[in-house]
Every structure is written in C-alpha cells, then in structure tokens.
Amino acid sequence: MTLAWIVAASIVGGALSVCAAALALFLRAAWIQSLVSYAIGALLGAAFLEVIPHAFEHGEPHRVAASILGGILAFFVLEKFFLWRHSHEGHDGDPGGEPRAAHDHGHSHDQGRSGMLIMVGDSIHNFLDGILIAAAFLQDVKLGTITALAIVAHEIPQEVGDFVILLNSGYSKAKAFSMNILSSVATLVGGVLGYYSLQVIEGWTPVLLGIVAASMIYVAVADLIPGLHRRTSMRATVSQTILIALGIGSIALARALLEGLQ
C-alpha cells in the first residue's frame, strides 16, 4: 500500500508541475526573451536558496562543494561536446564551415545546448524529489502527502523557468512540453527506487544535489546571463534586474510556503 501511495504521489506531483509549466505554452513569442531574466532568477534562487543548503545539511560540506565544482566542470565539457558536434556537422557539406543548426534554427541562440543541459539537471532533481517522497511515505502517509504538495509548490516556478529556457534555446513549444514530460518521469523512477533501496541511494543524495546545483548555476551564468548583456539600455537593464529578482523571489516564496506546511 505504501508503494501505491508513492507511485500515485510521484505521478500526480509530476503532472501538476508539468501542467503549471505548460502555462508558458500560451505566452507570446516576444515575451519569451524577456522571461529569460525570470528564468535566471528562478535557477539561481533554486540553487542557492533550496538545493545547496539542503545538500550541506545532509552531506559533508567539502564533499558537497567538490561535487558542485566537479559538476560545473562536467557541464562545461558536455557543452564543449555539443559545440564540437555542431561544428563537425557544419563542416560536413558546408564549405563555409557554419553549423547546419545555425541555418535550420536561426532563432536559437545556442543550438539547444542550454536547454539540453538544464534538462539533465532537472531530471536528476526530479529523481531526488521522488526519493524524498518515498522517504516521507515510508515514515507516514500524512507526512508523505505534505511532502509531495511541498515539492510541487517549489517546483512550479522552476519548471516554468526551465520551459522558457527550452523555448529560448530554439525548441518548439511541443518539443519543450514533451521534454518536460520525460523529465517528470524521473520523479516516478526515484520514488520506486527509493522505496526498494532508500538507504543506498540516500548516501549519494548530497553529491547528486551538488550536481543539480551545478547545472542550474552553469546554465544561468555561462549560457543565459551573457545574452542579457547584448541589451545595454537602461530600460532593458532595469527590466532584467526586476525579472531576475522576481525569479529569486518566487523561489523564496515557495520555500516560505513549504516551511509553513511543515
């Protein structure tokens, strides 16, 4: 019966998060670029206000810090791989050496790299959410229910930010939505594995959280913020600053609601 509760909570929680993120489907194309600033704030807020403190609370600080640094280096290498692949494809049959992706997806700023990187981090994050749901339900059904609701509450602003990043990376709305659905399946996987092997997985949780934080920080700082600097007017700077602050504030508000539920 406990496993059934875990599966149900993981499915419902993932579905609610995806549905909330799907609200971005109705955004006008002109708004997407502006909301990248909000996505940056949501990513940095989630990393520094939620993920990193949680990792330090449950793991040895030096080990967690090393996992964050190692994660940033790993995402740097992974992005270099994406760059090399597109460059290689561009040289095959393209005398000018320009990647085909630049022709096929002229509206994309990075040939989908930041979108792919954020999906890797988001899938790990959802996997860990599933483990947390399993751990809570193994203690008590009421605690499990509250935990699942709390996870949905703090996931909504982050999922919206992730969706905007996918759109900004050149993904169509349909593809971005389908990738969000695939990422949410990781919650169910984490819940089921957590039920059967919680003690083994829990030992790796702080390290995995460090990698999650690394993905958020890397995408925000390395891929998204440089794009904001192309708009140098005072009006654009003020707008970007306000939206980044709103992104951080939405995570802080979700965290406050989470503490209120507990």
Image (tube, helix red, strand yellow):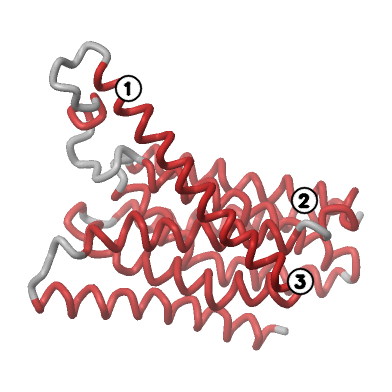
Of labels 3 and 2, earlier in sequence is 2
Percent position of residue 166, x then y = 37, 48
Please report contact status of discs 1 and 3: CB closer than 8 Å, yes or no.
no
- Image quadrant for the N terminus? bottom right
Looking at the image, tell me whether mark 2 or mark 1 is earlier in sequence order.
Answer: 2
Distance from disc 2 to disc 1, alpha carbons, whole Å, reads 43 Å
In the rendered structure, which amino acid carries the disc numbered 3? Glu
- Residue 189 bears which disc, if any? none
Q: Callout 1: 10 Å neighbours few (<14), some, many (20+)?
A: some
Mark 1 — residue? Answer: 88
Q: Nearer the viewer, mark 2 or mark 1?
A: 1
For the residues labelled 3 and 2, say whether their Cβ atoms are less than 8 Å apart: no
The circle drawn on residue 60 is 3
Specify the quadrant of the image occupied by residue 141.
Answer: bottom right
Q: Which residue is mark 2?
A: 7
The percent position of residue 23, horizontal first and vertical second, equals 38, 58
The CA distance from mark 1 to mark 3 is 42 Å
* Residue type of the residue flagged with mark 1: His
Q: Residue at x 57, y 80 (%)?
A: 255
Count of marks placed on residues: 3
User: What residue do we see at 37% from left, 66% from top?
Assistant: 40
Query: Viewed as shown, does residue 138 lie left or right of 171?
Result: right
- From what the image shows, is residue 103 above or below residue 53? above
Left or right: where 197 falls relative to 15 = right
Q: Quadrant of residue 148?
A: bottom right
Element type where label 2 sits in the image: helix
Answer with mark 1 or mark 3, whichever residue precedes in sequence: 3
